Amino acid sequence: MARKTPQEKKALSLANDRRNAYGENDKSSRKNIRRNKTIARRKYRRVLRNSSADPDAVVGEPARAAKTRKSGWRGRKSPDIPLAEFIERQRELAKKRQGRKRSP
């Protein structure tokens, strides 16, 4: 295996490393994804529990429990973008911001 030059390492890093460009805190996703999945599961369990608690109360209730599907939470997550693309975006935004706040 041949040694990589620093330039090759940098090019690989720009291609392989990813950045969250969605606009929210990337650390918050760790908590929020887990929380949303938990809420969906809890909702499903409550439907089942409430529909099977008293089967004689309402005639159509057991049928509703049988029809209930476990929906699950599918996050509308957007994939992270390559580091090179992220840096290019940052540079474009910096150019737009340059000279905006000039003193009179």
Image (cartoon, rainbow, N blue to C red):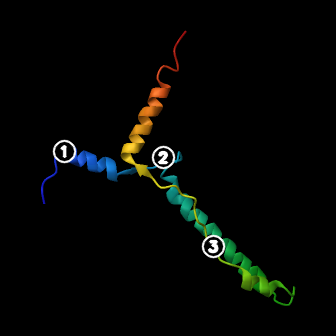
Q: Left or right: 50 with respect to 74?
A: right
Q: Please state which of residues 9 and 55 is positioned toward the viewer in this rendering.
A: 9
Residue type at numbered disc 2? Ala
Residue 39 horizontal/vertical position (percent): 64, 67
2 or 3: tag closer to the N-terminus: 2
Residue 57 horizontal/vertical position (percent): 87, 86
82 lies above or below 1? above
2 or 1: tag closer to the N-terminus: 1
Q: Are marks 3 and 1 in contact (CB under 8 Å)?
A: no
3 or 1: tag closer to the N-terminus: 1
Q: At 65% across and 76% down in the image, what residue appears?
A: 70
Location of the C terminus by quadrant is: top right
Q: Please state which of residues 71 and 56 is positioned toward the viewer in this rendering.
A: 71
The answer to whether one can see residue 25 in this image is: yes
The circle on residue 21 is 2
Q: SS at mark 1?
A: helix
Location of mark 1 (residue): 6
